[in-house]
Image: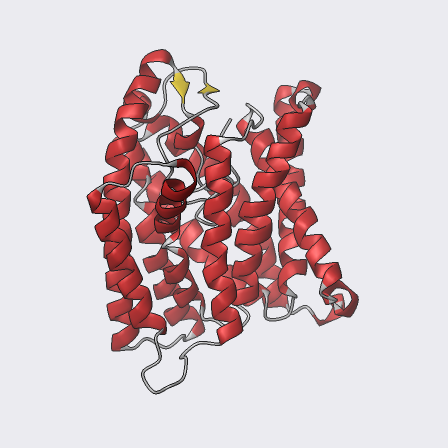
Amino acid sequence: MDQSTRTNHPTTVSGTTGAGMAARATPLAIWLGLLTLYLVWGSTYLGIKIAVESIPAFVMGAARFLVAGGLLLLWSVARDGRDALRLTRRELRDSFLVGAALLGGGMGMVALGEQTVPSGITALLIALMPAWLAVLGRIVFGDRLPILVVVGIVVGLAGVAILVVPTDGRLALDPGGLAAVLLSPISWASGSLYASHRAQLPRRPLVAAAVQMLSGAVVLGVASLATGELASFQPASVTASAGGALLYLIVVGSIVGYTTYGWLLRVAPLPRIATYAYVNPVVAFILGAILLGEPISIRTVLAAVVIVVGVALIITARSRLQAGAAADAVATEVVPADLVAAGIAGARAAPVAPPHEAASARG
């Protein structure tokens, strides 16, 4: 996910990152990594859509991030020893807040919305998360808002209007599901901005991701209790396809997606990595149509093109701002935390991943 270039909490790494380390990986390896990221994070919308067919949205999300976060934490301890668990109160608090916003709010609303909204359309609406990052960053923190970003925001919103504005006096989408999907990128952007401007997060990427996932699991678990989802949930009613989709989201969407994204951050130029923000929605749109038979009309195709163009303009403009900060960071072997926040996560441009998948790649 796209982030502001301002940073308060730099991340020390053992060596350079981004373009500075690109020579250590072949172009083919980098493109294979990007292709993996496109397919993995682009397919998570499909996975969520299948999973919520027989698993309540909040229950599904809580289970997903509880298991994925637990596995990442065990992996971190196995690799770094028990020192990996030594976190300050500030790190725990900020990790909880970021995880609650990104995964509890962001991914929770995606799962809730996809109960009634097609997965491809959900992906297109979520793709505008960089626009929310830019707008909220400007309003709350006074971040720069280049003219190309403004143009991208206007174009992206025009695409949303094409997609959702009624033509016959009625919304083409379920109002409740649409509202949930539209709230998701706002929550995700809020968490991302807090992470990049205010938060002090664990310096070990795996620990940061794990704690945020577990925090999201707590928030979604509480939501499942408050809404009565957990009380009415019947595990015996879970279909094989829904169970398989949940397993896919845990292993591939969260763990494989996160580790691939983290590797790319170390070996590939940031602008190239950022392309996932507008490629993933296209992947999700196509997969939804092919595998779930989601309808495609001239209107939805036009909206998709306009939204993707708007997001590409935003990412291009903000990548130029990031390039200068990244160059300074490489020179001192310190990476600004906001440059490595993105997906858990997805992220999106975001900490724990796209706006949606990887756990925060910040360390």
Residue 334 lies, in percent from the top left, at: 41, 17
Q: Residue at x 43, y 40 (%)?
A: 140
Above or below 73: residue 295? below
Q: Nearer the viewer, residue 192 or 326?
A: 192
In the image, 117 versus 252, the foreground residue is: 117
Residue 358 seen in render: no
Up/down of 150 relative to 84, above or below: below
Left or right: 183 as drawn, with respect to 282:
right
Vertical arrangement, residue 35 with respect to residue 73, above or below: below
The x, y position of residue 323, in whole percent, is 26, 28
User: In front: 49, or 215?
Assistant: 215
Quarter holding residue 74: top right
68 vs 342, left or right, is right
Q: Position of residue 316 (x, y in %)?
A: 24, 42
Residue 62 rendering spot, x and y as whole percentages: 66, 53
Q: Residue at x 47, y 71 (%)?
A: 117
Number of numbered discs visible in the structure rendering: 0
- Identify the image quadrant of the N terminus: top left
Q: Is residue 261 left or right of residue 54?
A: left
Q: Is residue 15 visible?
A: yes
